[in-house]
Amino acid sequence: MVSPRRKVLLVDDSELVRALVVHALGNAGFEVSTIDDPSGLAAALARDTPDLVLVDATFPGTDDSRLVELVAPHAAGRRIVVFSDRPEADVQALAARMGASGTVPKDDVSRLPGRLDALFAAH
C-alpha cells in the first residue's frame, strides 16, 4: 500500500529557505505550500488542510508575543512545528507558548524530511 503524500505548510519570510525546503521535502514525497508571513496563516489554513504547519520562529517586525498570537489559535488539533536556528531553549519555550507539537532546527535542510517523518511517527 502506498502512503498518501503528506501536506506541509511552510511559514517563513526567507525566499531562499522556502525554496530549499520545498525542494528537500518535495523530493522526499511531501506536498509543500508556503506563505511568507504568519499574519496570512488563518487564510492559508482556510484554503487547505495541511498535515503539518512548519513555522519559522523569527519574522522581521514580529516579536515572540505577536507570533504566539498569530499561531496559537490554530494549534488545537493541528500539528504545528517551530522551525528555527535560534538557541534550542528559546525555541522550545516559544513552541510551548504556541501550543506547537515540536521543534525542528534549521541547521541542515537536507535532514528535514527525516525529522518530519520522525515527528509524524511519534504522534
Image (cartoon, helix red, strand yellow):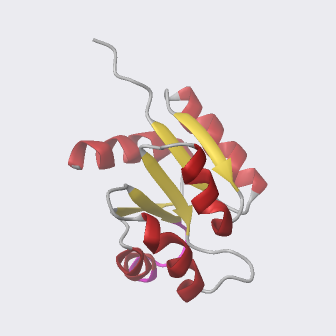
* Residue 6 lies in the magenta stretch: no
Which quadrant holds residue 118?
top left
Q: Is residue 105 above or below residue 20?
A: below
Q: Residue furthest right?
A: 15
Find out whether residue 85 is within the magenta segment.
Answer: yes
Which quadrant holds the N terminus?
Answer: top left
Please indicate whether residue 109 sits to the left or right of residue 82 in the image: right
Identify the residue at horizontal 37%, vertical 55% (top origin). Answer: 79
**Where residue 120 sits: x, y (%)?**
30, 44
Outermost residue to the top:
1
Q: Does residue 72 appear in this view? A: yes
**Extent of the magenta region:** 84-90
**What is the x, y in percent for residue 106?**
54, 60
Q: Nearer the viewer, residue 101 or 85?
A: 101
Q: Quadrant of residue 62?
A: bottom right
For residue 56, side relative to residue 14 (left or right): left
The residue depicted at 31 percent of the width and 49 percent of the height is 119
Decide which of 57, 105 is in the foreground and name it.
57
Q: Position of residue 83 (x, y in %)?
A: 51, 62
Residue occupying the point 37% across, 67% down: 100
Quarter of the view holding residue 31: top right
Residue 34 x/y as whole percent: 65, 48
What's the residue at 43%, 34% (across, down)?
Answer: 6
Residue 106 visible at all: no
Height in image: 81 above or below 5?
below
